[in-house]
Image: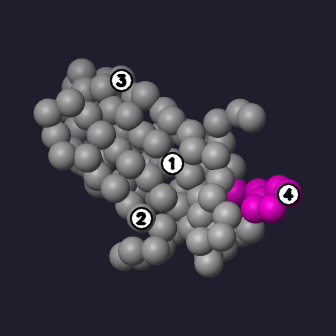
Amino acid sequence: QQNPFDVDNITALGFDLTWTNTPVANQSSDDKLAYLVSKAGAEPLMHRFNEGAPVDRSTGTTTIAYPLVDGDEVTISSFFVRNDGSIVSNSYTIVLSVDI
């Protein structure tokens, strides 16, 4: 399956994570986003689907605050979880070479 995630608006303060927001099969528009962002020499950033301000699949985008500098190689792994935690989607990884 094609990776539904993409990265946009990359700045020194972070980036936007975007995705195809049309649910298919057993997906739901209110599935919650979870992600892990990491790079060498920095603490990883993890967003759990049931913490803080949950992000629904239907929004199609979220802004991730993560300090970046030119030349960073950032790994972003993301997936969705059903509201009740009963179903977890495939996870998808993007490796981003920062050029800002």
- The quarter in which the C terminus is drawn is top left
Q: CA distance from mark 1 to mark 4?
A: 19 Å
Q: Which residue is mark 2?
A: 48
Pointer 1 or 4: first along the chain: 4
Graded by Cα atoms within 10 Å as few (under 14), some (14 to 19) or many (20 or more), the crowding at tag 2 reads: some
Name the residue carrying label 1: 78
Residue at 41%, 56% in the rendered image? 63
Residue at 67% across, 64% down: 87
Q: CA distance from mark 2 to mark 4?
A: 23 Å
Q: Is residue 57 visible?
A: no
Q: Is residue 57 shown left or right of residue 76?
A: right
Quarter where residue 64 is shown: bottom left
Disc number for residue 25: 4
Of the residues shown, which amino acid type is indicated by label 1?
A: Ser
Colour setting: one colour
Which quadrant, please, contains the N terminus?
top right
Q: Is residue 26 magenta?
A: yes
Asked if residue 1 lies left or right of residue 63, the reply is: right
- The residue drawn where x is 57% and y is 67% is 32
Magenta span: 21-27
Q: Main secondary structure of the magenta part?
A: loop
| Quarter of the figure with residue 58 | bottom right
In this view, the residue in front, 38 or 15, is 38
* Sequence-earlier tag: 1 or 3: 1
Q: Spatial distance from mark 3 to mark 4, Cα to Cα?
A: 33 Å
Q: Secondary structure at mark 4?
A: loop
Q: Which residue is mark 3?
A: 97
Residue at mark 3 to residue at mark 2: CA–CA distance: 24 Å
Q: Nearer the viewer, mark 1 or mark 3?
A: 1
